[in-house]
Image (cartoon, rainbow, N blue to C red):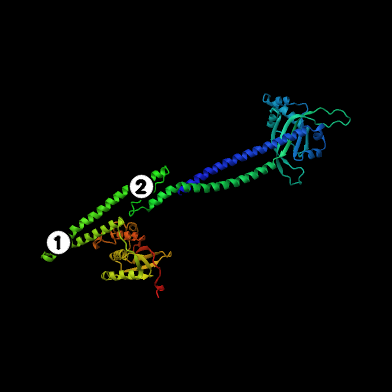
């Protein structure tokens, strides 16, 4: 995973966590606000219920309460002789367990006998407070607590009722539970009672579900947008680093004088670019010293090698050496020639490394080009008992014919040294239409796979198939690669032991008309 994606994931995760916390907090605040509003509505309904004149709502017909409080469930329990202080003493922890149990049993009996379901509840399923809730109610400063219960709709279709959650206000207070007397007598005094008045939680729950859906959509949308923003910001933040990387990738042995840009960001990227440029300075000096040494040494060696070869030739022609002396002089001649070729190769490599390898580009016909190579190497192939042939399309491309001929001759020469009996030179136009592929295929012994990656290294040789006794210094493929690189091309070798070897040269066609032999009139 790239650094850009890692930064994007980190930023997105942080923003998603922030959005999640904001969403959860907002939902919590909204739920609390909705619950507070519900509690306020319950308190208002309780005030209306307790102020009903003469107990009209508490003891009148049930339809009156249903009409007045259509959305409420109401229940009243008359405590009789009990009051709040009596409840507190009876339910307090100072009582013995036996006394507390007796008090609670008596209280339950009173509540069950004096319970009135006003509206919204089934008498068979009234509200019943637990011991803990009774203690909380008795000890609460205002004599009020809120509880939640599930209530079955008694007006629904039989057999299809469903429990609905309700929030219920439970209040202790004096209630007018008796109707006014018809003969004009004053109404009986209020009674100390527990009043239950509840509202359904379904609207609030529906609202919360809708809000959760909205927040979920906003969360995922916000996460997607934050991921996109993080990706763009990460790309912008990494742009200087990407520019440094691209510049560093362009720099090679041919253009060590170039430098990577140093962005004025005053951060680690600028420091990294400065360090890379300092390293390139040191590398350029080292490479330049190496090139100068190779070029100067080659030039200096040419004179004594030429002198050695000349004196050996003079002794062979102008004197009468013995047989052993003649053999020694011929060895001196052979090694001098070999050293001369090595010096020439080193000079060419030095020019290639320094970018001084001059190319003379001109149009080339691939078929004619390969045929000319076969004609030049025919005597050498005939002596080795090898058959040379050409195949493929005739493609026009642009390049330096002398330099490319040097490449192809080197590849064919390697195949001859390997003992190939059939060598085929071919050319074809690649699918893109912008590149030409030349190949040299032989049926030699092949090259082991472990050697293929190093074939273009300088002085590297595969002893099994390229013997030193046949000459060469292991620089031919390095020179060939330098020439192909100068043409902005690619060269590689594929081989399998016992199946032969194929060398490929891929070159750009260049700015010349592209046609094959079928287009020629």
Relative to 327, residue 210 above or below: above
Q: What residue appears at the point 32 percent right and 48 percent down from the top-left corner?
A: 281
Q: Nearer the viewer, residue 501 or 407?
A: 407
Residue 171 occupies quadrant: top right
Outermost residue to the front = 264
Q: What residue appears at the point 27 percent right and 52 percent down from the top-left corner?
A: 290
Tell me, yes or no, whether the two marked residues, 2 and 1, touch with CB atoms within 8 Å.
no
Marks 2 and 1, how far apart at CA: 51 Å
Kindly report which numbered mark, 2 or 1, lies closer to the viewer in this rendering: 2
Q: Which residue is mark 2?
A: 277
Relative to 241, residue 368 above or below: below
Q: Residue 233 appears at what percent x and percent y?
A: 49, 47
Q: What residue appears at the point 57 percent right and 40 percent down from the top-left corner?
A: 21
Considering only order in the chain, which callout, 1 or 2, is on the residue closer to the N terminus?
Answer: 2
Q: Residue 136 appears at what percent x and percent y?
A: 68, 30
Left or right of 199 on screen, residue 411: left
Asked whether the viewer can see residue 326, the reply is: no
Q: Which residue is mark 1?
A: 311
Outermost residue to the right = 183
Asked whether the viewer can see residue 214, the reply is: yes
């Amino acid at each position: 995973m790239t650094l850009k994606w890692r930064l994007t994931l980190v930023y997105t995760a942080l923003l998603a966590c922030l959005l999640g916390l904001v969403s959860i907090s907002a939902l919590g605040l909204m739920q609390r606000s909705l619950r507070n509003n519900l509690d306020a509505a319950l308190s208002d309904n309780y005030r209306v219920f307790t102020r009903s004149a003469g107990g009209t709502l508490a003891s009148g017909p049930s339809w009156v309460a249903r009409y007045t409080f259509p959305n409420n469930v109401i229940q009243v329990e008359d405590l009789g002789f009990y009051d709040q202080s009596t409840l507190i003493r009876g339910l307090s922890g100072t009582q013995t367990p036996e006394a507390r149990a007796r008090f609670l049993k008596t209280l339950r009996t009173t509540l069950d006998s004096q319970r009135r379901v006003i509206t919204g509840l089934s008498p068979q399923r009234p509200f019943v407070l637990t011991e803990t809730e009774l203690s909380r109610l008795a000890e609460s400063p205002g004599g009020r607590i809120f509880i939640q219960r599930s209530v079955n709709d008694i007006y629904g279709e039989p057999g299809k009722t469903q429990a609905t959650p309700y929030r219920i206000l439970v209040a202790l207070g004096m209630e007018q539970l008796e109707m006014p007397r018809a003969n004009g007598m004053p109404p009986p005094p209020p009674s100390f009672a527990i009043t239950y008045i509840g509202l359904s939680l379904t609207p609030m729950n529906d609202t919360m579900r809708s809000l959760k859906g909205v927040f979920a959509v906003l969360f995922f949308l916000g996460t997607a947008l934050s991921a996109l923003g993080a990706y763009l910001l990460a790309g912008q933040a990494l742009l200087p680093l990407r520019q440094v990387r691209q510049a560093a990738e362009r720099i090679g042995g041919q253009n060590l004088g170039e430098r990577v840009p140093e962005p004025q960001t005053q951060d680690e990227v600028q420091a990294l670019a400065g360090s890379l440029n300092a390293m390139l300075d040191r590398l350029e000096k080292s490479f330049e010293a190496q090139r100068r040494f190779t070029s100067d040494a080659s030039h200096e060696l040419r004179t004594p090698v030429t002198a050695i070869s000349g004196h050996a030739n003079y002794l062979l022609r102008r004197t009468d050496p013995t047989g052993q002396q003649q053999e020694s002089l011929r060895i001196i001649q052979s090694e001098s020639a070999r050293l001369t070729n090595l010096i020439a190769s080193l000079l060419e490599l030095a020019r290639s490394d320094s970018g001084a390898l001059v190319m003379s580009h001109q149009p080339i016909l691939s078929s004619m080009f390969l045929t000319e190579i076969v004609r030049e190497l025919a005597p050498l192939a005939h002596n080795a008992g090898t058959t040379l042939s050409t195949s493929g399309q005739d493609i026009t491309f642009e390049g330096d014919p002398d330099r490319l001929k040097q490449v192809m001759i080197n590849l064919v020469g390697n195949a001859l040294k390997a003992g190939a009996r059939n060598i085929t030179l071919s050319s074809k136009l690649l699918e893109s239409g912008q590149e030409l592929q030349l190949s040299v295929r032989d049926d030699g012994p092949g090259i082991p796979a472990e050697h293929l990656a190093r074939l273009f290294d300088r002085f590297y040789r595969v002893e099994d198939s390229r013997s030193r006794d046949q000459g060469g210094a292991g620089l031919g493929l390095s020179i060939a690669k330098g020439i192909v690189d100068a043409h902005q091309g690619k060269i590689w070798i594929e081989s399998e032991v016992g199946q032969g070897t194929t060398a490929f040269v891929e070159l750009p066609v260049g700015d010349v008309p592209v046609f094959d032999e079928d287009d020629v009139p």
